[in-house]
Amino acid sequence: MPVDSTRVFLRPIANPFALGFVGLAGSSVTVAGLEVGWVGASQQHQVGLIVLVFGAGLQAIGCVFGFLARDAVAATGLGLLAGTWASIGLVLLTTPPGSTSGALGTLLLFAATACLIAVSLAAQRMLVPALVLLATAARYLITGIYELGGGSGWTSAAGYAGLVLGFLALYGAASLELEDERHRPVLPTLRHGRGRDALDPSLPKQVQEVAAEAGVRQQL
């Protein structure tokens, strides 16, 4: 007698955080160059274009693959970064060099708060992405204060915070890329709990909860 069955097809993909963090590093360092004076104010529109295409573009790709990997933290976190950096890029493209934007400042304060939600979730399994997102929140906060009229000292602080964020994001990308390539940690990613269990090669253990995940269960 035939037995009804359901098949769920799983597709191996690379860790989307790595690509997203490369975009984050590039965006943050490029804007930091403008903020600390390494890049002339006359090149503001070029900086905006780079942030929009390189930064937001890579983060958006990472967001899509975060959803495909059924990783809500990666998907939502990288989606938040993509939307925020796309907004920064568009404002830089459409405003006079050296001007500030209260609208952008308000968005950055909101994005900083939203990043903290992703930080609290990421910290439950892997500390390196959590630290990168925490540094992103700090960078957004400082830049937001400047955009809301905080004074020239805040733009320099935002620039140096952006350089620190660029280094952390690049380290995060490298550590996760090497982990994917070697199937084991090479540079510390500080996995713990469920994050450490994710490297367990036992297939039944990895898929035992898949029936309860969005896209498999009947309703979201």
Image (cartoon, grey):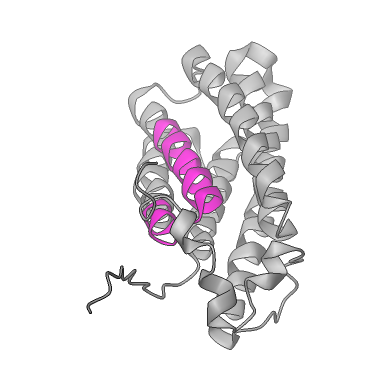
Residue, x 68% and y 15% (percent of image)? 150
- Which residue is pictured at 42% across the width and 57% down the height? 62
Can you give x and y, in whole percent of width and height, for residue 112 in the image?
63, 30
Residue at x-position 46% and y-position 54%: 213
**View extreme (bottom): residue:** 182
173 vs 47, left or right, is right
Q: Is residue 208 above or below residue 51?
A: below
Q: Residue furthest front?
A: 1
Q: Would you say the magenta stretch is mainly helix, strand or loop?
A: helix
Return the residue nearer the eye: 209 or 150: 209
Residue appearing at x 46%, y 72% in the figure:
14
Residue 49 x %, y % = 35, 42
| Residue 180 among magenta residues | no
Q: Where's the N terminus, which quadrant?
A: bottom left
In the rendered image, the residue lying farthest to the left is 2
Looking at the image, is 141 positioned above or below residue 121?
above
Q: Nearer the viewer, residue 47 or 123?
A: 123
**Number of marks drawn:** 0
Would residue 86 be counted in the magenta stretch?
yes
Q: Is residue 70 visible?
A: no
Q: Estimate the x, y position of residue 34 in percent, counting from the top left.
A: 55, 39
Specify start and end residues of the magenta stretch as a single range: 63-88
**Front position in the image: 151 or 205:** 205
Mark yes or no: residue 117 visible.
yes
Position above or below: 81 against 98: below
Q: Is residue 203 left or right of residue 97?
A: right
The image shows residue 20 at horizontal and vertical percentages of 49, 56
134 or 196: which is nearer to us?
196
Of the 4 image quadrants, the one containing the C terminus is top left
